[in-house]
Amino acid sequence: MSELQYPEQKGTNGAIGGTDRPDNVRKLKKKRKGAGKKIAVITVFIVAAGAAALFALSQNSTPAPAGTFVDTGQIRTMDVENNVVVNGTVEGVDSVRVMSSSEFEISEILVSVGDTVAKGQTLARLDVSALTEQYKKAQTALDMSKYRYEALKSLYEEGAVPEQDFVQAQTAYNNDLITVNSFDIGSKSKIDSPISGTVTRVNANIGSKSANMTAGEALFVIEDLSRLNMKVRVNEYDISKIRLNQQVIITSEVLGDETALGFVSDIAPTGEKKDQASNEMVVPVTIDITESSGIIAGVTGKASILIARSEGTLAAPVDAVLQDPTTGENVVFIVKSDNTLKSVPVTLGIEGTLYVEIISDQISDGDTIVLSPTFELTDGMPVYTAPN
């Protein structure tokens, strides 16, 4: 194949048959050269942008804080209370469970739950018809023995009958008299209330025998609801704190946001087992309710017995106090303005559920203190806290 020949044309030097390529070839070469430059420019731009991003990232990153991280709280001025909290049931001060050993059927019930009754008022009547028949027979026998006794007495006084006959007649009369009096139909035919109060339970049923109630179940429950109390049982470890007349605040679901007030009125002289399955001992305590705020008998409540109270005192969260097990000294760690620690010995006062009274001339209201401190913390140690 022969070599490709270009047609004669003027070169750039103006000569015919020069070596320069045609214009279209020169243009193609220019285009390829320009594309290379563009790629180089884009590459430089990407590298520059990446460097700028890395520089910006390095400028915006936060250096790691110096020191040890600690969780903090604050010293506050507040009222601190120490309370013993126990649960119990609200009852009437005077409460009786009316029961009967009678074998007679109940024929009539005269009261309902909620009725107010007086002492001695009849609650139910019993069917004593069988007893009445027995009483009539006993009364007839008494009438006869009385007649014979009185007749023989006159004759004996006149000396007309032997003493033995008179004594026998006298004995028979006395026995019959005792029998008749023992019937006491009036009291056996009814069940009366032993106290004045309100009927809070009626378990009796017409036709049932009063003695056949379920074991421990009362026919009626009568309570004096004009005076209420609360029976609680205090743990043996807390009973040493309880004293007569201590103030009590009572809360209950039935009260909502309201509270009832009372005081400790009785502390049992002996303890008892909390339950059969436990060896834990408790002591029964009675709380008289003075301001009920709508609390009613039969509901459960929570009694907060006030042991001690300090008003307007400096206090720290309970978990801010570190105690040396060897010396018993209590300290708190204050976080100073330069984020270093200062160890401050403190005396503890009244301890509440969340806060404890702090006594020291080196602390002030609003001081920031370390929560849950450990023995690794020291004076002057740099610390940092969570950002607000």
Image: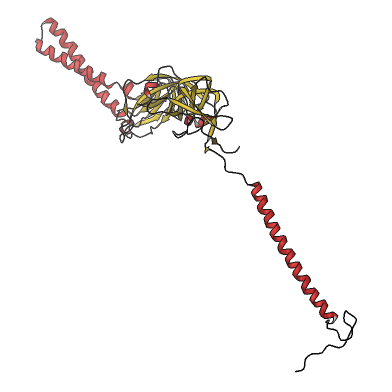
> Residue 387 placed where, x, y %?
59, 38
> Residue 293 placed where, x, y %?
53, 24
Residue appearing at x 28%, y 27% in the figure: 133
Q: Nearer the viewer, residue 76 or 294?
A: 76
Q: Is residue 148 left or right of residue 87?
A: left
Residue furthest to the top in view is 158
Residue appearing at x 29%, y 29% in the figure: 130
Q: Is residue 231 left or right of residue 71?
A: left
Work out which quarter of the rendered image holds the C terminus and state it. Answer: top right
Residue appearing at x 54%, y 26% in the figure: 75
Residue 165 position (above or below residue 102) = above
Q: Is residue 12 left or right of residue 281?
A: right
> Residue 284 placed where, x, y %?
36, 24
Q: Is residue 333 visible?
A: yes
Residue appearing at x 26%, y 18% in the figure: 181
Residue 252 position (above or below residue 176) = below
Residue furthest to the bottom in view is 1
Q: Nearer the viewer, residue 252 or 115?
A: 252
Residue 262 position (above or below residue 218) = above
> Residue 318 placed where, x, y %?
47, 29
